[in-house]
Image (tube, grey):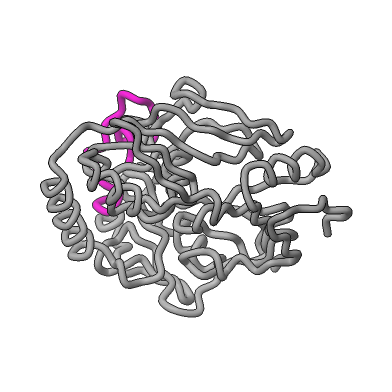
Amino acid sequence: MIQNLPQVRGRLTEDKPLSDLTWLRVGGPADVLFQPADIADLQAFLRVLPGDVPVFPMGVGSNLIVRDGGLRAVVIRLGRGFNGIEIKDNRVIAGVAALDAHVAKKAAEAGLDLTFLRTIPGSIGGAVRMNAGCYGAYAADVFVSARAVTRQGDLVELGPEDMKFQYRQSDLPEGWVLVEATFEAPSGDPQALTDRMEAQLKKRDDTQPTKERSAGSTFRNPAGFSSTGRADDVHDLKAWKVIDEAGMRGASRGGAQMSEKHSNFLINTGGATAADLEGLGEEVRKKVYENSGITLEWEIMRVGEPIPE
């Protein structure tokens, strides 16, 4: 257990179960969960937190498996105070706790096109961190800058060159906490943008298991068929296709299943452990490699410790 925690204005909770905070509803406890009141509270906390204590920034848990043994770290979860959305000319400034869908809708009302965010589960911090995207558009395409608090408690500004965006990833130093992002969006007719988002939602609901406990896409689409992550790689080959070809649509382990509706969605059918989910995912990767020679890369982040067998 972490000793001598700093005084804060937000909320500190020791031994906090993280299963309540992830969309897959699995995971053991964090040593400490910190929910800062504002940026100054976060800075003050990190300045005095011993440097050898690991820090894990967590969003809304939409793209995350926390292993059953939990996290030996301070988990920092940003909420109120970090979810503002501001429009300035053709720029959208969003706190990292703002939901992607809310940002897309508010931008559309102002005649700005961030419609690709509408169907992405999660919050802006995760969208920037993972360079989220769909329909051929990515966070990197509209990203201007972000603000982050370093592990030492300093507030810094980051540009695209600092983030080093790649397919489904960016480069952020260990323990740094994103707090705000600025996007520059193309203009569009508000009604046309709204109509487009409604069509995207319908398509998503028709093709994805949106009513199930999932964490979105499980694996990245094979980049250049080799998962190198290079900017010039193509993503024409879809993960669901190679999973289907390996006979793993609907495959299950314990309470975990690869969705029958969309085989690149790992779902908790009820009572799954993190070990069930991760184990099934690894089985899928093995079968796909045996069948096609393609190594699927996890899109879902997996953190923490398993329970020793």
Residue toward you, 21 or 95: 95
Chief secondary structure of the magenta portion = loop
Q: Residue at x 82, y 41 (%)?
A: 48
Residue pictured at 49% horizontal, 28% vertical: 163
Look at the image and say whether residue 233 sits in the magenta stretch.
yes
**Residue 272 visible from this viewpoint:** yes
Residue 99 drawn above or below residue 21: above
Q: Residue furthest right?
A: 4
For the record, the magenta segment spans 222-242
Where in the figure is residue 52, as x and y percent of width and height?
A: 81, 41
Give the residue at x 27% y 51%: 105
Is 173 positioned to the left or the right of 158 in the image?
Answer: right
Q: Is residue 161 depicted above or below 124 in this figure?
A: above
Q: Locate residue 186 relative to residue 303 in the image: left or right.
A: left
Q: Residue at x 66, y 62 (%)?
A: 306
161 with respect to 42 (left or right): left
> Which image quadrant for residue 258?
bottom left
Residue 290 appears in the rendering:
no
Q: Is residue 168 magenta?
A: no
The image position of residue 88, as x and y in percent, is 35, 33
Q: Position of residue 3 (x, y in %)?
A: 87, 55
As drawn, 56 above or below 157: below
306 up-or-down from 253: above or below: above
Residue positioned most to the bottom: 270
Q: Quadrant of the N terminus?
A: bottom right
Q: Position of residue 81 (x, y in %)?
A: 55, 51
Quadrant of res 92: top left
Marker count (numbered): 0
Q: Quadrant of the C terminus?
A: bottom right
- Given residues 149 and 219, the one toward you in this image is 149
